[in-house]
Amino acid sequence: MTQATRRAAELRQLIGHYDYQYYVLDDPTVGDAEYDRLMVELRALEAQHPDLQTPDSPTQRVSGNVAAGFAEVRHGVPMLSLDNAFDDEGIVNFDRRVRERLGRIDDEIAYVAEPKLDGLAVSLTYRHGRLAVGATRGDGATGEDITANLKTIGAVPLQLRGSAPDEVEVRGEVFMPYKAFEALNAAQVAAGERTYANPRNAAAGSLRQLDARITQSRRLDVYFYAVGRFDGGERADGQTALLKLLASWGLRTNPETRQVLGVQGCLDFYHALGARRASLRYQIDGVVYKVDARSDQEKLGFVSRAPRWAIAHKFPADEAQTVLNDIEFQVGRTGVLTPVARLEPVQVAGVTVSNATLHNMDEVTRKDVHIGDTVIVRRAGDVIPEIVRVLPERRPAGARAPVMPETCPVCGSKVVRVEGESAARCSGAFTCPAQRKEALRHFASRRSLDIEGLGDKLIDQLVEQDIVRMPSDIYELDQPKLLGLDRMGEKSAVKLLAAISRSRQTTLPRLLNGLGIPGVGESTARALAEHFGSLAGLQAASLDAIQAVPDIGPVVGASVANYFADARHQNELARLRALGVTWPEGEPAAAAREDALPLAGVTVVLTGTLDGITRDEAAEQLTTRGAKVSGSVSKKTSYVVAGAEPGSKLARAQELGVPVLDERGLRELLQRA
Ligand code: IVH
């Protein structure tokens, strides 16, 4: 080892240590000047000997490169969500369910109570202690690779401390403290840019910057609270121990967190924190309670996408009273007419609200909303405001109940009520400008074809002037067509055309999502693309074949089959292709690869304690062989593997006639092929 190598390592270690004291312990022992001096020395050394520059060097917190986009990251262990409770009763019920399921009805359960941060869940994978990948939660199964952006957050260690495992994926919440939020909005105003509605949006916008230097300027913060994948180390025996372990690796955990006893402990914590909520330096929207003991967590397991051992107790959302002036009907992408309340503008949680959704006519009837009513509106976070209830005692004489129009307010086509659904639809389909606009918006949106700059106002004009009717028309736009539009100069036209051109290179999941097939969102689009590998494969697939795709039921399956059977859609797809829209396919598709694995198509549920192998290891071995490991037993489950002290899943398997394997059976299954 040369002297330069040794010094570089020493500097990295020192700076890492000072970062830890500053960001994690909030207790710096050196001044800024000394810290800067060390950074300057390290930068100089690395400039002289570029081979000394390691990815975890503190000089690499911000790269000078602007990324072209975010790659996808598949989470090894899905990132779940939480059930919500909105009042004390919801928590009393939660606690009772926990005690019942654990067979400890008379015990007080130890919970960990944590503030529910209003930010974004992220996942960070450390290999041999070094930060390897950072990702957003995304849809829980797949997120976006935002490693470069996460590295800019001072509280994210580039290197774990202590005895870190071979590989660990840690999870936490990135948020923007109020102070940083206010400073950011002030700067945005000064620069003539748009401001952010709340710290959560600001944090999201900042994390998804392609230029990490912008992320760095936004002063984001993070607290960690969970682990996903974990290899080569002792697992913590509960949430308290886990938080300790995370802290020992130099990861910040929320200092407000407490272990509490029983339901009363939970509620006391909630009310005490609620009273101090406004004085915290960051926004929280509730408290999360987690059953502390890991053995209990495992016994409780999961329901669909949320653990049974945790719940979010939300703080009441902000409400205000105002007058409902009118109800109008908006036509959505699939023609559904949604009643929208036009309100006398009112301040709710610091934002002026003048519209609220009423969802559908059943809800209008159920809430007995009349035009002219005084109503309570609620706005929670960045969700669309809604009408909570009307104040019937304040209803003026002559107030009238709204009626669903018989013809579409936009195109005049007949409105049809769908049998068995509460929705009414405009029958104009693609001839209705409103449906056209929404379909095009969806096609151009970030998670579909991602055409930057093709925003709402532009789409309105393009549809109103009949320049664009279908997505494929977008790819026939040229300067002469664009220059006739409002506020469209040559420069913006060139920019837009370039963005359109870039979007031609897309992916099959994006395209499928963008088509707006009823019932097909991002994750279904991905499932279809993965399964069939190519558009031709999907177009040729029978209804049965489509329904064989995991997670696709009869309704969505039929919708997909109908879509591709329609000649108009076939023409549109052919036209998109002819106009240069392409995506990778043909190479061994994920579906084909998985089909080749010995346990492809097999779904397994694990329950109880196994002897020679942990449940995580078993799950891992199963999935690498192509099996799907699920948390709940259904008719589609191929096998339930039951260890010692199996839970209700075993009973459920017997009820449904699902074959049950013991540990030996599991080993045999793993040795298949
Ligand atoms: S635990 C299975 N703990 O809330 C455990 N989540 O509604 C799932 N969140 O996606 C998460 N603070 O973004 C957990 N102390 C906390 C949290 C927290 C905020 C967010 C997180 C999650 C969402 C679920």
Image (cartoon, helix red, strand yellow):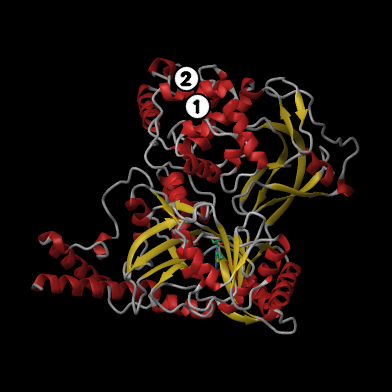
The percent coordinates of residue 472 (x first, y second) are 48, 23
Secondary structure of the residue carrying tag 2 is loop
Task: Say which of 477 and 209 sits in front.
Answer: 477
Q: Mark 1: few, some, or many residues within 10 Å (few <14, many ≥20)?
A: some
Task: Say which of 512 and 340 sits in front.
Answer: 512
Is residue 605 visible in this depiction of the protein? yes
Against 328, residue 282 (above or below) is below
- Left or right, 210 with respect to 431, comes to left
Q: Are marks 1 and 2 in contact (CB under 8 Å)?
A: yes
Against 235, residue 153 (above or below) is above
The percent coordinates of residue 361 (x first, y second) are 79, 38
Tell me the distance, in whole angstroms, between the alpha carbons under discs 1 and 2.
Answer: 8 Å
**Looking at the image, which residue is at 73% across and 63% down?**
655
Task: Quadrant for the C terminus, please.
Answer: bottom left
**Looking at the image, which residue is at 60% across and 74% down?**
608
Against 651, residue 196 (above or below) is above
Ligand 1 visible in quadrant: bottom right
- Snapshot quadrant of residue 665: bottom right
Which residue is denoted by mark 2 in the rendering? 485
Q: Earlier in the sequence, mark 1 or mark 2?
A: 1
The percent coordinates of residue 523 (x first, y second) are 53, 46
Furthest toward the right, the residue is 397
The percent coordinates of residue 338 (x first, y second) are 71, 36
- Snapshot quadrant of residue 11: bottom left
Which residue is denoted by mark 1 in the rendering? 458
